[in-house]
Image (spheres, rainbow, N blue to C red):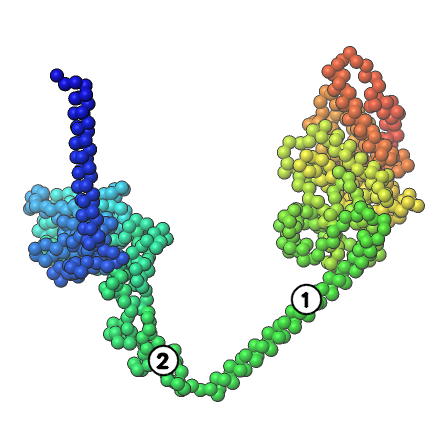
Amino acid sequence: MKTSQDWSLEEEKHIYRKRKREREKMKVQNLILVAVFFYLAHTQPVNGQLRKDCQTSCGRVTIEYPFGISQGCYYADDRSFKLTCNEKEKLLFGSNFEVINISHSGELRVMNNISYACYDSLGTFGPNLYYTYTLANLSLSHKNKFNVVGCNALALLSTFGRQNYSTGCVSTCNSPSTVNGDCNGAGCCKTDVSVPFDSYSFETSPSRLQNMTSVYDFSPCTYAFLAENGTFHFDGLGDLMNLRNVTEFPLVLDWSIGNQPCEQVGSRSICSMNNSICFDSTRGKGYNCKCLEGFEGNPYLSNEHGCQDINECTSTIHKHNCSDPSTCRNKVGGFDCKCQSGYRLDTTTMICKRKDFGWATILLGTTIGFLSILLLITCVQQRMKRRKTAELRQKFFQQNGGGMLVQRLSGPGTPNANVKIFTEEGMKTSTNGYDESRILGQGGQGTVYKGILPDNSIVAIKKARLGDNSQVEQFINEVLVLSQINHRNVVKLLGCCLETEVPLLVYEFINSGTLFDHLHGSLFGPSLTWEQRLRIAVEIAGTLAYLHSSASIPIIHRDVKTANILLDENLTAKVADFGASRLIPMDKEQLTTMVQGTIGYLDPEYYHTGLLNEKSDVYSFGVVVMELLTGQKALCFERPQQSKHLVNYIASAMKENRLHEVIDEKVINENNWREIEEAVRVAMECTRVTGEERPLMKEVAAKLEGLTVTKAKHQWSDQYPGEVTENLVGVGILSEQGDTSSTGYDSIKNVASMHVAAGR
């Protein structure tokens, strides 16, 4: 009986024997791998070098690498390049085709059999022969034609691969008289071959449209075959009777190396062996090789059969074109025609001619001298032109007050002025040469362009229409004052350009259009709400009050209108276009100027007297408020005769107690009518005929601010109805102005009459 110790000993012996067998098995496998490695090393081409014993011909056909017969003699990565030489000395591709020619450019010419289907005199289907051909990794060339011979014949060419494809050809005829020697559809037809390049086989299938016994005597069969274009010529009745006397025709197959184009395969291509280059295959995948110009041989090899230099001086095929053979000198990749000393080569005739130094030298010297003088004149003209341009820019700079502006900027009293002086070239570049597509708007004070500065910031560039030299100092003062204004509701002046005939002003760019666009245009979305309109009116009023009362030198805008009120992306109002503005010296309350402004907004008192003061802006602002309330234009000739001006239009509505008809219905709701009425009263106070009767701009701003406070308190009282609301600011305003409606109407009526009489 075995003890546990005996069992343990036997188990160890078993494990030892098992490990010994595994080690012996691994030794055998390693020997096999080494043998395979040595076999492959001696049978595969290395660096384009083939085995010395490779068969180079079969019958009368030369075998060219990458094609070959035995292992190591063809391109090993693709067995499509393996050929067979049979006992009849015929070189075969696969089992279907006899190879007749191998081309380095990627073509393999083979012989292709004819498919046919025959019928007896009764129209019964008789002998037939259909072929299905295997292409391996080659493809049909576009140089082939699909040919069909026979009367009332139909044949199909079908290919099989990732994508099956079929095409066909029909040939019809009823009698021998309709058949001629042209393959144009009568007894014979042909069509182009444009099949998918990845087809691995094809089939030709001949048949007849119907069993017509009437054509049996001269066309008993239908023939179908692929042939290289130009190798089959239809001869009429002879081919119809018995085309089988010829059993095959040449066919072109396309081949290439691998599946990647030259760019992807890079230095891994077999073309990089010696004096050869890679080019993409015409079959849609892979690549082929060709020798460099001046070389010939097999571009797929690097040995003595590869691309070798052509000696054009001795070659009978690649001959030189030197007129005298003794002057030909061969070089790698080409040749030269070397003339002896004292002679030159005429490249047209390739003849060595004696050098003529006389006239040639004179002509060359004259040409060089003329070109030098011309270059010198051009340089002088360019320099003079640049100097003239610089002088003209300096003239305009001084004419437009540039010196005065620089002096005041550097002097005391303008510590906060931040005016940048731009160059003419910079302005021209930023507006793309003042291109029309960059125009943002045009008005009486000039044209505004969209500009893009070198730092990609967008600005508005105004090309002013300032031609009076007497206004230069005032213009400079205006630039300095506006540059110091830092008000959130004033479009900021960034700088100016004085090197042009008329000055250019550079402003910040506001991207959401004008108040006029939002009220009367169609480019923007939903109309402004009452809250937005009231806020805009408050912002404009506050800005004008600041210009009239808080600026270092009072400023009268003189052209307040909805088209000069810009809105940013948050619909915040920005007062713009100070081109018509005037500065009021501290010792004067009004100025006498040429009347300037916009019809519909122009103060009638200023229009008649030419006396400009801050109340002129108050009148224009009143018209703007009326536009905000009604959504109507300041002057509209489509309204009745007495209501063409918006001031008259509002006045008539108040007199006839139909104010609700003229207010924009988009802003009216049950909670804001009292605010709207009060805003109308404020607007009518602003548009009184006499300037003394109009309120100051800061009073107008306070009243409109009061409306916003009233609105907030009304909203609070709606939430807490038990609270007392009699102390609203709006109530006080209403009681103070409760007896002014008739006066306002009379004065407004006078204003309206004046406008109509003035033709506005």
Q: Amino acid at mark 2?
A: Lys
Q: Residues within 10 Å of mark 2 (few under 14, many from 20)?
A: some
Q: Seen from this angle, which residue lies furthest right?
A: 587
Give the CA distance from mark 1 to mark 2.
52 Å
Residue 386's label in the rendered image is 1
Q: Residue at x 69, y 29 (%)?
A: 529
Percent position of residue 264, x then y: 36, 51
| Residue 364 makes an appearance in the image | yes
Q: Residue furthest bottom?
A: 358
User: Residue at coordinates 85% horizontally, 46% vertically from top-left?
Assistant: 583
- The spot of residue 65 in percent (x, y) is 22, 58
Q: Amino acid at mark 1?
A: Arg
- In the rendered image, the vertical position of residue 82 relative to residue 677, given as above or below: below
Instruction: Give the quadrant of the C terminus.
Output: top right
The quadrant in which residue 278 appears is bottom left
Q: Earlier in the sequence, mark 1 or mark 2?
A: 2
Number of residues whose C-alpha sits closer than 10 Å to that of mark 1, classed few (under 14), some (14–19) or many (20 or more): few
Q: Nearer the viewer, residue 667 or 397?
A: 397
Residue 338 is marked as 2
The circle on residue 288 is none
Q: Residue at x 71, y 30 (%)?
A: 532
Q: Nearer the viewer, residue 682 or 254?
A: 254
Q: Give the secondary structure at mark 1.
A: helix
Quarter of the figure with the N terminus: top left
Residue occupying image coordinates x 37% and y 84%: 340
Q: Is residue 616 visible?
A: no
Element on which disc 2 rests: loop
Please indicate whether residue 48 sits to the left or right of residue 476 in the image. Answer: left
Q: Where is residue 34 shown, x and y percent of the image?
A: 20, 47
